[in-house]
Amino acid sequence: MPNINPAIFKSYDIRGIYPDELNDEAAYAIGRAYARRTGAKEIVVGSDMRLSGPALKAEFIRGIIDEGADILDIGLVPIDAVYFAVRKWNYSARLAGTLAKRAGAMITASHNPKEYNGFKLPLSGTGWVRGEEIKIDVGQLPPDLPAAKGKISAADIMPSFIKHILSFADLTKIKPLTIVVDAGNGMAGKVVPLLEPHLPIKIIPLNFELDGNFPAHPSNPLLPESQAQITQAVKNNKADGGVIFDGDTDRLFFVDERGEFIRADMTLLILAKEFLRREPGAGIVYNAICSKAVPEIISEWGGRALRSKVGFVNIMATMANERGIMGGELSAHYSFRDNGYADSGFIAWLILLELLSQNERPLSKIVREFQRYNKSDEINLRLDDREAAIAKLKAKYRDGRQDEFDGLTVNYPTWWFNVRLSNTEPLLRITIETPDQETTDAKREEILKTINP
């Protein structure tokens, strides 16, 4: 293997600090490996506004064309646009009928701090090349290159992408709501102004300037310092709600009219109700750490509640394998069958606008009917031996109903918890749900004492 840090290759993608962990040499090798693995005739490449994006993109593209594959450069885009290009858009007459050969790459580190960058590598259908697969390929790259190099062309995908996004909602049903939109200096700052002329709403914009330094707040919407500005703006403007995107726009969180964040599994239920109206009996995918209210309510509505492992790649695969119409998870990825099974923050936003417009109740009251249980915020522990911690919990709670579908889940009649290894960080993640806050606090203390007596 070239002089490349193996830690950059994650379960789902490739990610690291630039240039200390992920550098230009790595980008070139990854480009070569990706071209060889996919055998694609043409690879779509897009990037977000991160400062290291141009350098990584140039070397990644050089690696691909050195292997003889062509590049379609779609420029500075949200990750949704790469999914659209790979899975929905007939971007090249030359490739007509060869959908299986489509491949794409998005250069982004999603919600990570500004020092990071990386690669997400979607294929057609629900296909996805994982970082751990590219790691193997990079280590086996031959020194020789094909004689013929690939070509580079460019395309403006945004008009077709915007039309596609708008097709998911009935725009005539959206009322003139007032909505705060925090783009977080990410790619939503490019896309929302293109959507706005088609929408009857009043948008209060926050941080629409594309800036990989993230000067307003971190790109992760879950951090308290990221939430303060939109919370205050919703209150100050007496808005009907708000929405905050991460850097590449695949994740977004909703804020109600009081400025309070809505947990993503509750948003999943709001969206699920609409999709079950459109297609009764459809499958809705949720992940293993969503509230147990999610499968309960989906079943009550006549839908098929489909459990998935945590991770947007797993959500997409479960949707395809089990014929689901949409899916979502606590990290605020919402995926849609008719979007090539891929996630899209913009589609979720438009559908929520339509639903909010048709409901006389404010967003806070719509959500309240789904809040049957008390769910803890995710507990993240940095431990030397995470497997030993799981073993302790498995022994302590052996009288509960256990499954190891995704980590360890233990169910009791009135409460449950899940503990699992993070797929992206060296953390142990714990989720607890009980009937009330007092019980949640007690069980949290009990579980933590079991891990660290």
Image (cartoon, rainbow, N blue to C red):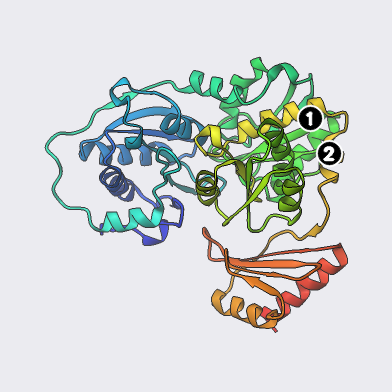
- What label does residue 356 carry, if any? 1
Total numbered labels: 2
First-in-chain label (2 vs 1): 1
Disc number placed over residue 366 in the picture, else none: 2
Kind of residue at badge 1: Leu
Residue shown at the point (65%, 19%) measured from the top left: 196
Query: Up-down: is 341 above or below 429?
Result: above
| Other-residue count near label 1 (Cα within 10 Å), few / some / many at <14 / 14–19 / ≥20 | many
Please state if 54 lies on the left or on the right of 338 as rendered: left
Label 1 secondary element: helix
| Whole-number angstrom distance, CA of label 2 to CA of label 1 | 9 Å
Q: Position of residue 398 (x, y in %)?
A: 68, 80
Quarter placement of the C terminus: bottom right
Residue placed most toward the observer, 34 or 19:
34
| Location of residue 409 by image quarter | bottom right
On screen, residue 61 versus residue 263, left or right, reads left
